[in-house]
Image: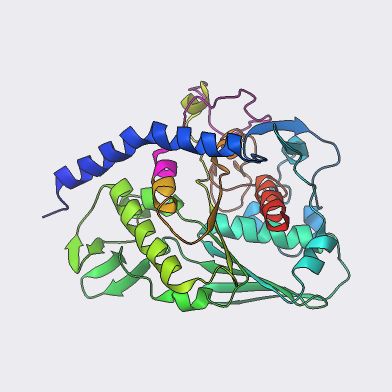
Amino acid sequence: MGLSLVHALFLTLFLLCHQTKAEESGATRMLAAECNLFRGKWVYDASYPLYDPSSCPFIDPQFNCQKHGRSDKLYQNYRWTPFSCPLPRFNGLEFLERYRGKKIMFVGDSLSLNQFNSLACMVHAWVPKSRSTFSQRDALSKVAFEDYGLEIYLYRTAYLVDLDREKVGRVLKLDSIKNGDSWMGMDVLIFNTWHWWTHTGSAQPWDYVEVNNRLFKDMNRFVAYYKGLTTWAKWIERNINPAQTKVFFLGISPVHYQGREWNEPAKSCMSEKQPFFGLKYPAGTPMAWVVVKKVLNRIRKPVYFLDVTTLSQYRKDAHPEGYSGVMAVDCSHWCLPGLPDTWNELLSAVLSG
């Protein structure tokens, strides 16, 4: 029998009724803070992008939209401008000096790959002739800037929690993280997960969900996400020394398959040439964002929330669309150069603050 329907409904209603409170308390904290980097607007800036995609050896082909025939480049020329303070332009030399001999790791799905590629290109653009290498083995990829001793890693994991193949089939274990040893010893960790939690049918990579040694054929996805993130939070509490490692969680990266979310129901991201310029995105705050906030608010150790959801919702123009070479229509990942560069400018600004 599946997870109690009452349990699922209870958590969903709990999250819904706390959504406004979470937003209000978050807004209050942000207004009280010196600077809210995540409330602002997109402005045209001809000095962007931060690098030439043809000169960066670290872009995964599916994100290189120009290589696959996208002719417009306007999406590369927008700069995020917070209302309350300036966002510093990324300086690769300063970043290399600050993190000389350090290790930075992105942990998550293909959106973490997006951000990993972006940061490697942003740094490489400042030192194109310095020694750099790329290596990959199983779930782990690494870009090393050898003259500076900086190592940037990607650990691919769709759910953060374990996905194991067992006799009964593929099992998503919501209360287990066995691969966390690979995340240890880093100076900076940037986590991300959500994209795969919504997949169903043939796109779903698991057959059962396991909680407390009990198997379920399916589960309310927000309940599952909450349980999985709670397991990750416990891993942070047990394993992270804040004096040695700074931890970030990347906010929900939105998709733009349904134009009704920005009041244009006949459209998707296909052929979109401009961001959404209104102050309030019509679709509102995703429920997954509320789940993330509830979990992060309960972690005692410092985890910085890179709250990129709203600024990313505005960027309906910045997806690969039909120019990924992989998917016929891709309104979930992001072209490079593009939006993930802003995520990394925000990351760099917080790290240097």
Quick check: can you spot residue 59?
Answer: no
Q: Residue at x 26, y 44 (%)?
A: 11
Of 298 and 343, nearer the camera is: 298
User: Horizontal and vertical percent for residue 204?
Assistant: 35, 55
Vertical order, 101 against 248 (above or below): below
Front residue of 11/331: it is 11
Q: Position of residue 344 (x, y in %)?
A: 68, 53
- For residue 49, say whether it is visible: yes
Q: Please report the residue visible at 81 percent of the width from the left and 52 percent of the height from the top.
A: 52
Residue at (65% x, 53% y) in the render? 63
Does residue 38 show up magenta in the picture?
A: no
- Residue found at the far left of this picture: 1
Residue drawn at (59%, 70%) of the image: 243
Q: Quadrant of residue 132?
A: bottom right
Classified by dominant secondary structure, the portion drawn in magenta counts as: loop
The magenta region covers 264-290
Q: Position of residue 119 (x, y in %)?
A: 70, 59
Residue 264 versus residue 244 in the image, above or below: above
Residue 288 falls within the magenta-colored stretch: yes
Examine the rendered structure and indicate whether residue 273 appears above or below residue 242. above
Report the label total: 0
Q: Position of residue 320 (x, y in %)?
A: 62, 44
